[in-house]
Image (tube, rainbow, N blue to C red):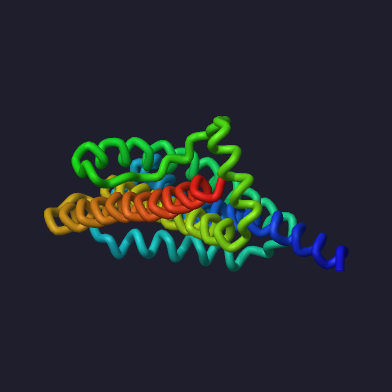
Amino acid sequence: MSVESDELRGMGAAFPFLMVLSSFFITGFVFISVDMPLVLKTLEGRQFDRVYDVVVVLKNYWLQFIKRDVGASILFIYCLSALISGIAIQQVTTVGASLLGKIASKLIPRASFYTTTVSFSKADAQFKAWLHKHKLAKLEWEWQLFLYYVYSGLCTNVLVASFAVWSIVRASRPLTCWLIITCGLSIAYILARSSVMQTVDDYFRRESEKQS
């Protein structure tokens, strides 16, 4: 029985770590697969007449990768690059989301937004200890954090891709309006996920204070 409980505790400790790593990998994979080819074309100073030409660029990028004789080492480097890129992008996203949250909280007084600032306070330590004692609460908190990381990272990729498309495609009024709407919706969704995460965090912190 003790062996099984030790295994369960080990799985419980590994699960949030794997969730965070997978969220970083998803963000980095999208960046390398979609954003990076567009950013490279931007740096080259390329110009296209239609958005369809951008789709062709992405298709050719993927076809070149698929047709290559890709070995295990190349796949490992690709996955490692995706993970590292995702970690870097998430740090930028976290800072950007925190700044957006501060601005939005002034415009919407009753709204609150999540900030992943590192805290070494006694209250924060007690909250983390409470989470470890209440597995369902811990799982829900970690799941919401995972969703926050995934969706905010993907929205950041959308913002980068939108800027790249705006840079390499000759501007037109419909395209500019579409990109502005896309960026606005992406920022709004980052704030929405941040608000959900903050609501969950506040709820469980109140619960931990009641039971302390």
Which residue is found at the position 42% from the left and 48% from the top?
202
Which residue is found at the position 60% from the left and 45% from the top?
128
x, y percentage for residue 142?
A: 55, 55
Q: Looking at the image, which is closer to me, 48 or 198?
A: 198
x, y percentage for residue 36?
A: 46, 49
Report the side of 45 relative to 14 (left or right): left
Q: How many marks?
A: 0
The N terminus - image quarter? bottom right
Which residue is found at the position 75% from the left and 59% from the top?
9
Q: Residue furthest left?
A: 173
x, y percentage for residue 127?
A: 56, 44
Q: Write down the quadrant of residue 135 in the picture.
A: bottom right
Decide: is 137 above or below 95. Answer: below
Which residue is found at the position 54% from the left and 36% from the top?
123
Report the side of 188 relative to 71 (left or right): left
Q: Looking at the image, which is closer to me, 7 or 74?
A: 7
Q: Looking at the image, which is closer to me, 130 or 115?
A: 130
Report the side of 150 relative to 17 (left or right): left
x, y percentage for residue 44?
A: 39, 41
Q: Residue furthest top?
A: 121
Q: Is residue 37 visible?
A: no
The C terminus - image quarter? top right
